[in-house]
Amino acid sequence: MHIPDGYLSPQTDALLGIASVIAAAGAAYKTAHTLRAKYIPMLSIGAAFSFTIMMFNVPIPDGTTAHAVGGSLLAILLGPWAAMISISIALIIQALFFGDGGILALGANIMNMAVVLPFVSYGIYRLVAGKSGVSSKRHWIGAAIAGYVGLSAAALCAGIEFGLQPLLFHTANGTPLYSPYGLNIAVPAMLFAHLTIAGPVEGLVSALVVTYLQRTNPVMLQLKSNTEKSVGSFRYRTLIIGLLVLAVLSPLGLLASGTAFGEWGGEELQAKFGFIPSGLQKLGDFWHHAFLKDYGISGYDHTFWQQALGYLISAFFGLLVIGMIALIVQRFLGRSQGRTS
Amino acid sequence: MELPNWLSEASPALCRCGCGGRRKGNFIEKTLRDIIKIIQEAVFSEEIALRPGFLQRLDARIKVISLIYLLIIVNLCAHLSLLWGFYLVLLAIAVSSKLPLRQVVARVWLVIPLFTGIMVLPSIFNWVRPGDPLWVIADFHHSLHLGYLSFPSVLAVTSQGLWGGIMLISRVGISVSLAVVLTLSTRWMDFLRALRTFFVPKIFIMTLEMTYRYIFVLVSAMEEMFLARKARDAGQSAPKEERRFVASAVGGLFGKSLQMSEEVYWAMTARGYSGEIRLLKGSSLCWSDVLVLSLVVLAGLILIAANKVMG
């Protein structure tokens, strides 16, 4: 379920990043008044817990084992908003440090596993459990259905994201640039794997943990309603804004640069490259011509991108040479200073 | 002396083929192995990040910006030559910074083509994705019907499918390599702190840092649970019982983490935490950091421009 970088186009990542941000903004609005200052340690440890859940191997009937995502369980225990934050943090740590899931694709992964999964699960759980007592059967049945349906919904989202890629992004002759399967293949494939194995595992784990807590520690199942009632501070809002900024960070920046690239007019281009120092520009012209001669393409300097390429390469090597010289000078100075002292 | 009956029976814990070896990989050992892998990875990457080298010396903030920027560039480039040219430069830098090649090259390129390759394999045939035939595998002379599905008479590998597949594998592999190179050369705490530069509120950085710390606390608590179970485990237990054990471990761990979060909160309060967050000051950037950043930005623009020029 963790989508790595390269499967989705940066444009899709950007879009899903924005969608995740909107969800996070919703969380900020919704929960600004309900949480306590105590929440920082609780959220940190909740995120660590959600990271750890994914490490449990669950024995399944054919003799092998499978992993549970644990998203629906967290939604049931902590409520959907806190679950969203915890899972997002766990996903960020997995992407940054364990290479599990892409960094650009974080928006997509957060959307699927931290927004869709907990909310769908929580809705179903509440619907089934209703107002029944803590020890009622309806709680664990609700948890089982919630885990199964929630994970399948997340898989459906991932399938749709994959399936849109070949429709939107391909070269002129139809070579797919990202994930190659259309909706008619990607969605059933994702759904099949999750409806048959991962979904039941998720449902099973949620139900078993809920029955365990019913048996041993029923207070924990009521935790969620307690935290909602308590009066909170504004701190939680800044936390979510942080999440928001982080989610925006990659995809949105890319969107800005992406559209700017497509829309550069003559004047903008002048402004864009006006910063190259005149000396470098001279050097650039020199390199530019050498570049042309070596490659011998006539009319190479006619389009904007060809000119831009020449300038950029010259600027790059110019800067590289300056850096090298500076490094050598610094080292030389350092050595002579070392000798004098 | 007489052997008790259960000792002379073939143990269900032994391999069924009769080789006498133990059945490998029950869920306890698998989980323990996963735990060890996580901890080992963390310790190992910390050790690499402490070695002297070009990438390690670079400021973490520069690395975070470069990572995101270059990932976008790599994902926008649509030419294999550009992607692989970029990868070779990246590899050269990684080697000069004494990053372990086994980690950077072997782990990425043994795993990615396998998983992504299996996923992408069906799409190279014209039955799944129509395209220009490159290599005809079979010609049935008449179109095939299977239920309401109908397939063209020729089964062939399409050039679009093949190049699309190679492109996807390259892109995924190079994106992962980029992330591996930059995260391996940075200490995790530095990496998290670097996020502060991007207007991420302190409270969020603190949550991330605390999460990172407590992952290891919870993981070792989990390890103890599984070791304790392994120590008591003889033979094979019923899968139903195993699943119940996993569920009670998850439930128990949840209780433990709640209790811990309470205790951590009180410990923080006792040490003067009033809701205000103070983090250690970061170091300032030096000229070489700025130089490297400008080089990275220019290199990215060069790739984009070259991509446009090549069409």
Image: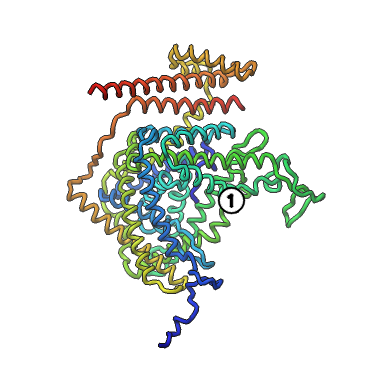
| Left or right position of B39 against B83 | left
Q: Position of residue A40 (x, y in %)?
A: 29, 48
Q: Is residue A16 above or below residue B228?
A: above
Q: Position of residue B236 (x, y in %)?
A: 46, 73
Q: Is residue A284 left or right of residue B225?
A: right
Q: How many marks?
A: 1
Which quadrant would the C terminus of chain B be assigned to in this image? top right
* Depicted B120 relative to depicted A266: above or below: below
Rendering quarter of residue A141: bottom left
Q: Secondary structure at mark 1?
A: helix
Q: Is residue B26 visible?
A: yes
Residue found 54% across the figure and 21% down from its top:
A309
* Number of residues whose C-alpha sits closer than 10 Å to that of mark 1, classed few (under 14), some (14–19) or many (20 or more): many
Q: Quadrant of residue B124?
A: top right
Q: Position of residue A268 (x, y in %)?
A: 49, 18
Above or below, A106 relative to B251: above
Locate residue A36 relative to residue A327 in the image: left or right: left
Picture coordinates of residue B149 (x, y %)?
A: 72, 53
Q: Which residue is mark 1?
A: A187
Could you tell me which residue is drawn at 47 percent across and 17 percent down?
A: A273
Q: Quadrant of the N terminus of chain B?
A: bottom left
Residue at the far bottom: name it: B1
Q: Foreground residue, B45 or A208? A: B45
Query: Residue flagged by tag 1: what amino acid is it?
Result: Val
Residue in the foreground of this view, choosing between A212 and A304: A304
Residue A142 visible somewhere in the drawing: no
